[in-house]
Image (spheres, helix red, strand yellow):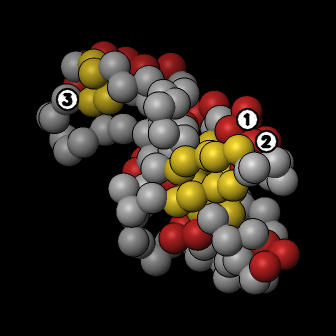
Amino acid sequence: MLEGRLAACELDTGTRISPGAARRLACEAGLIPAVLDGQSQVLDLGRSRRLFTTPQRIAMGLTQKTCRSEGCDRPASTCEAHHKTRWTDGGNTDLQDGVLLCPSHHQRAHDPAYETTHLPTGKVQFHRRT
């Protein structure tokens, strides 16, 4: 994530790099610009679409740097988008209803043997049902 014109930069792993290193990386790779709260990209789709789009995943990754499962630090780039409110229960494909989970925690979120709790901090807890 580039933060301002000359500010330090941060990779999705949390590693901070200099602006010069970021410019060199940008010259060698295609960048995907992200505009938060902008009008150029539809980021909230309501019930018109079931699966999250790539731009939505990118936007989630900018704010949710890692898997949201409590204690997991897998980077957002390795995570999958999950509905906090299940699609079948009326959940929307919107940023507010999306959470990034690594593949193992995403699988656990769909496992009926576990109860999923979304905490006010944005983290997710899993408890085995008894």
Camera-nearest residue between 10 and 63 = 63
The percent position of residue 89, horizontal first and vertical second, equals: 78, 79
The amino acid beneath tag 2 is: Gln
Read off the residue under disc 1.
103
The amino acid beneath tag 1 is: Pro
Relative to residue 19, is residue 124 depicted above or below?
below
Read off the residue under disc 3.
8
Classify mark 3: residues with Cα within 10 Å, few (<14), some (14-19) or many (20+).
Answer: some
At mark 3, the secondary structure is: loop
At mark 2, the secondary structure is: helix
Q: Which mark is residue 111?
A: none
Of pointers 3 and 1, the one earlier in the residue sequence: 3
Please report the residue visible at 68 percent of the width from the left and 63 percent of the height from the top. Answer: 83
Q: Nearer the viewer, mark 3 or mark 1?
A: 1
Q: CA distance from mark 3 to mark 1?
A: 30 Å
At mark 1, the secondary structure is: helix
Please report the residue visible at 54 percent of the width from the left and 41 percent of the height from the top. Answer: 69
Classify residue 18 by image quadrant: top left
Q: CA distance from mark 3 to mark 2?
A: 35 Å
Read off the residue under disc 2.
107
